[in-house]
Amino acid sequence: MDKEILKEIFLLLIEVIKAFCEIIWKKIKGFFCLIWDRFFGVTDISSPDRVEEQEWGATGEDTWPVVPDGSLVRKEESQPRGKREEVVSAPIIPELPEDYGDNRMVLMVRDPECLFTYWEPRKDVVDNILNALGSMAHSAKMVLRVYDVTDVIFNGNNAHTYFDIEVTGGARSWYIHTGKPNRSFCVDIGFLTPNGTFRLIVRSNQVKTPPAGVSEVVDETWMSIEALYEEIHATEGFGSSESVREKAHKGWQEVIKESVSSFETSRVSPPA
């Protein structure tokens, strides 16, 4: 055999033995690292093939830190060295604001004799009205002015009637008892001075209260199903007073009689 071939075979065997030894060495090294880590608590971080083992059943839920005011907290547990808890952040839930900066008023119907309204006056609008009132501002009171605007295009001055309700305690909503079913209403909120001057802050939408009793709209007559079928399926051969059910019943009776007669005739007649 040629010497070159023998040389190639020999080098190939050396490479195979070398690779096999490397595999065995990695297994042995990993086994000793695991034993060392378990008994001495030191991890060999110099090995690039070393993967941190997870201890089954140890989730650490009972040692999670309490996060104050949404800030970040970093806590080191009394665990083996090299193991540290991750940075934990608590979600920040913002509080609802007291207002949204809108100058508006909403009116709704609660029942035939009661309304409900809520409002949000903008601070700059209120301040401008108080400044315009001048010396009368300290004696002015905030009121709800309720207008009866049934069947009119309301422009602020053409309501049928109106009445005032004084708003106290810094309220932002109010139930209004009108005692008038089946009427349309609109509400203003503003400042009323002792001399009768009313300064509007904001005006609501218009609503209509429902009637207090049962509706008087009643259908006088109802078409029956039988009459409807008679109109649809009526033919020239039947009288108009005969119902569809009776027509069908008579038709089936005729068919059955003819079938029975034919059957009896075939039984009694002698063969030809």
Image (spheres, rainbow, N blue to C red):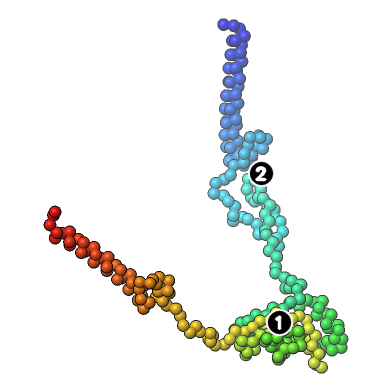
Q: Quadrant of the C terminus?
A: bottom left
Q: Helix, strand, or loop for circle 1? A: loop
> In x, y percent, where is residue 149?
69, 86
Which disc is residue 82 wearing? 2
* C-alpha gap between disc 1 and disc 2: 60 Å
Which residue is pictured at 59% across the width and 10% down the height?
6
Check the image and report above or below for 30 versus 238.
Answer: above
Q: Marks 1 and 2: which is nearer the front?
A: 1
Which residue is pictured at 70% across the width and 91% down the height?
161
Q: Quadrant of residue 195?
A: bottom right
Which residue is pictured at 74% across the width and 88% down the height?
158
Q: Amino acid at mark 1?
A: Ala
> In x, y percent, where is residue 64?
63, 55
Q: Quadrant of residue 114?
A: bottom right
Q: Helix, strand, or loop for circle 2? A: loop
Dot 1 corresponds to which residue?
171
Between 223 and 23, the residue placed more toward the observer is: 223
Q: Is residue 142 visible?
A: no
